[in-house]
Image (cartoon, rainbow, N blue to C red):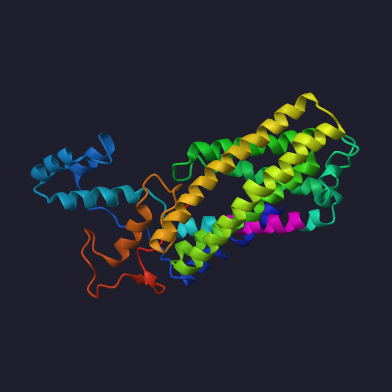
Amino acid sequence: MLGRVAAVVVEPRFIAKPCALHVGIQDSGPYQAQPNAILEKVFMSITKYPDEKRLEGLSKQLDWDVRKIQCWFRHRRNQDKPPTLTKFCESMWRFTFYLCIFCYGIRFLWSSPWFWDTRQCWHSYPYQPLTSGLYYYYIMELAFYWSLMFSQFTDIKRKDFLIMFLHHLATIGLITFSYINNMVRVGTLVLCLHDVSDFLLEAAKLANYAKYQRLCDTLFVIFSAVFVVTRLGIYPFWILNTTLFESWEIIGPYRSWWLFNGLLLVLQVLHVIWSYLIARIAFKALIRGKVSKDDRSDVESSSEEEDITTSTKGPCGRSSSNGANRVNGHMGGSYWAEE
């Protein structure tokens, strides 16, 4: 229900697209490469990233400068990528859902005894009532992660595709398994803990697409701090402590205990990997004085920069007449690529 409401609220025609246009994101795709049958054949049949030797051969064949051919391949690759407007709308939808579901979850858990004492997750187990609030919370989260699982195969391919695939599998497995085994109390704690940082990341991406660099940097710093504290601090010492030790003490070991905790430990491993990637970005930001490209960026890692460059330069890198390359008061190159 909440997911459907959020989808309607940020549906591109009503909210997301007007917001994107308001902050200066143009409703246009990437620069179209100049039609050329020979280069198109190489691009489609041989390679999208020609090496130096092939570039020199094409240069002689077409009587083009090597730089111009490199430029053609770069623009041709960017033609297959979604425009910034599309990515902005997608992030706005995710931001709305994560924020709404986190507010719903924290409001629900605030009045739940197991939020304040995790041992309550196991008292009277498995004969614990399933309230309507718990049911809706679980169904909304499960539906959302299933949608992420399927959309991952149609979205632009990213370097962390396998990690995200494992994360979605582990998450869906945990939600389903904990629901079937009536471990919903501890399940709600896991869900809420993960949602607290997700909406901050989407907010940072929205600021990035809008070219509000300072806001993007600030949100990313807040996200990084919240992510590390929740995923490497609270999660192992609060969640894993109750599932590994308190449950063993109160109800003893059981067959599904091993699978449940195994999936939770898989999530912890993924948390460590992502924390490492975030630390790399933060380290680069300290050196460069800004948040640079996300290490989990698209396969074409320079796509975001190239898309913006084409709006202020000619098709092959010639500067515009006024030489300006500033967006919202910041240099056009000072941004990090998406997710």
Query: 199 or 144, which lies in front?
Result: 199
Q: In this view, does 335 lie above or below 62?
A: below
Q: Residue 244 in the image: x percent, y percent?
A: 75, 35
Instruction: Determine whether, in the image, residue 301 is placed left or right of residue 32.
Output: right
Query: 62 or 297, which lies in front?
Result: 297
Q: Residue 191 in the image: x percent, y percent?
A: 70, 47
The stretch drawn in magenta includes residue 103: yes
Q: Residue 264 in the image: x percent, y percent?
A: 67, 36
Give the image quarter of residue 151: top right
Q: What stretch is highlighted in magenta?
A: 93-106
Query: 258 or 198, which lies in front?
Result: 258
Q: Residue 322 in the image: x percent, y percent?
A: 24, 75
Give the image quarter of residue 13: bottom right
Q: Which residue is drawn at 65% across and 35% down?
A: 265
Q: Which residue is drawn at 40% across and 74% down?
A: 329
Give the image quarter of residue 105: bottom right
Which residue, as the protein is rendered here, is positioned at the far top?
Answer: 255
Q: Is residue 152 above or below residue 72?
A: above
Instruction: Determine whether, in the image, residue 238 is placed left or right of residue 58.
Output: right
Q: Residue at x 51, y 62 (%)?
A: 206
Residue 182 seen in render: no
The stretch drawn in magenta includes residue 167: no
Query: 142 or 242, which lies in front?
Result: 242
The image shows a total of numbered marks equal to 0
Q: In this view, does 87 lie above or below 124?
A: below
Q: In this view, does 193 lie above or below 107?
A: above
Magenta stretch, main secondary structure, is: helix
Residue 325 seen in render: yes
